[in-house]
Amino acid sequence: MLDILFIIIGIIFVIAGIIGCVLPIIPGPTLSFIAILILQSTNLVSMESSLLWSLFAVTIIITIVDYISPIWVVKKAGGSKKALMGSVVGLIIGVFAFPPIGIILGPFIGAFVGELMSTNDTYKAIKGGSAAFIGFVFGTLMKIIFSGYIAWLFITEVIVALWN
């Protein structure tokens, strides 16, 4: 009975992890990894320690790259910190005010407005907005792929365990 409770809690963490891939305030890959640790703590599943350590390492790498990539892309494009912050604010507003299209347009519009406030140059604002958007999309796709893999691993391990 306790194993079933752990599986249910793990499913909640998997779902939260996937949601966290698009919401910057929720650490998606970390929650997804915690779901695997919860599953590992059951008597039904026993994963190789090398797999767990590899997933842990990838979680750390993705988290670091997710924070660095938008900054790096904006800097390479000549954008400002206001463009980057605008991208995050735009995402948060877009998610809640205009779902689901706000997830896509929010970061670009926010970065555009942030860069426009910083430079008052429309061309540079479009360039900075585009760069922040590309950095955001790269980080989001990376997190979705990883959390999706963990969700697949979680589901297959549970199905195999319950069929045996």
Image (cartoon, rainbow, N blue to C red):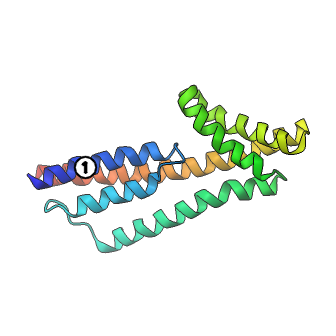
Whole-percent x and y of residue 25? Answer: 51, 48
Task: Give the secondary structure at mark 1.
Answer: helix
Which image quadrant for residue 71?
Answer: bottom right
**Above or below for 121 versus 26:** above
Q: Quadrant of the C terminus?
A: bottom left
Q: Residue furthest left?
A: 1
Q: Is residue 29 left or right of residue 116?
A: left
Whole-percent x and y of residue 77? Answer: 82, 52
Q: Residue furthest top?
A: 98
Total numbered badges shown on the rendered structure: 1
Which image quadrant for residue 67?
Answer: bottom right
**Above or below for 138 versus 129:** below
- Which residue is denoted by mark 1 in the rendering? 9
Q: Which residue is located at x 88 percent, y 43 percent?
A: 124
Whole-percent x and y of residue 13? Answer: 33, 49
Q: Residue furthest front?
A: 117
Whole-percent x and y of residue 139? Answer: 59, 52
Q: Is residue 135 left or right of residue 152?
A: right
Q: Residues within 10 Å of mark 1 (few under 14, many from 20)?
A: some
Q: Is residue 18 left or right of residue 134?
A: left
Q: Is residue 141 left or right of residue 56?
A: right
Using the rendered image of the protein, determine whether residue 76 is visible from the camera's viewpoint: yes
Using the rendered image of the protein, determine whether residue 100 is visible from the camera's viewpoint: no
The three-letter amino acid code for the residue at tag 1 is Ile
**Above or below for 23 versus 97:** below
Q: Which residue is located at x 76 percent, y 46 percent?
A: 83
